[in-house]
Amino acid sequence: MIPNEVFWLTCTVYQEAQGEPKEGKLAVAYVIMNRCWTRNLRVPEVVFAPKQFSCWNEDSSTRLRLTSIVGYAWWESAEVSDQAFNKTALDPSLGATHYLNEKVTKQMRGVLPSWFKEEKVTVRIGNHTFLLLN
């Protein structure tokens, strides 16, 4: 049985990074955990915070993915979530607290958000850009 916090972490990683490489899924899991650790919060408090993880927004198309879970992507998301939660794998996000898909964000908004600063980028993995913000 998956503990509640790891379950919500897995659900979020699955929806946010289903098509990303394993390293990218692990980095997304670490972004969530980095926020938990630095703010002394639990996983649900971080992932369900309004407008923080788009998969939980009411208008999110990725939210529907939980009704049609694909085996391998789910198990890989569960594996990396457990690793990040328990700190049994190195953090490929290099301490990041935020990430985004630059291409999709530009397509949807026309511009990157005001908090995006190139000097805050820690790493790019797959389609995601990871940032360490204060």
Image (tube, rainbow, N blue to C red):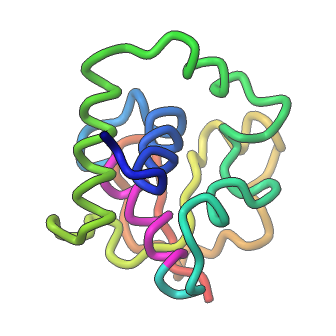
Give the left or right position of residue 58, taking residue 53 as reference.
Answer: right
Which of 11/111 is in front? 11
Which image quarter holds the C terminus? bottom right
Above or below 77: residue 124: below
Q: Picture coordinates of residue 64 (x, y %)?
A: 65, 18
The question of residue 69 being in magenta is answered with no
Which image quarter holds the N terminus? top left
| Residue bounds of the magenta highlight | 25-36
Q: Residue at x 27, y 54 (%)?
A: 82
Give the left or right position of residue 76, taking residue 13 as reference.
Answer: left
Above or below 71: residue 115: below
Q: Residue at x 75, y 60 (%)?
A: 49
Q: Picture coordinates of residue 109 (x, y %)?
A: 83, 43
Above or below 21: residue 92: below
Which of 2/23 is in front? 2
Q: Picture coordinates of residue 88 (x, y %)?
A: 15, 67
Most common SS among magenta residues: helix
Q: Picture coordinates of residue 78 (x, y %)?
A: 31, 40
Q: Residue at x 35, y 58 (%)?
A: 27
Q: Residue furthest front?
A: 1
Q: Residue furthest top?
A: 68
Among the 4 quarters of the image, the one containing residue 94: bottom left
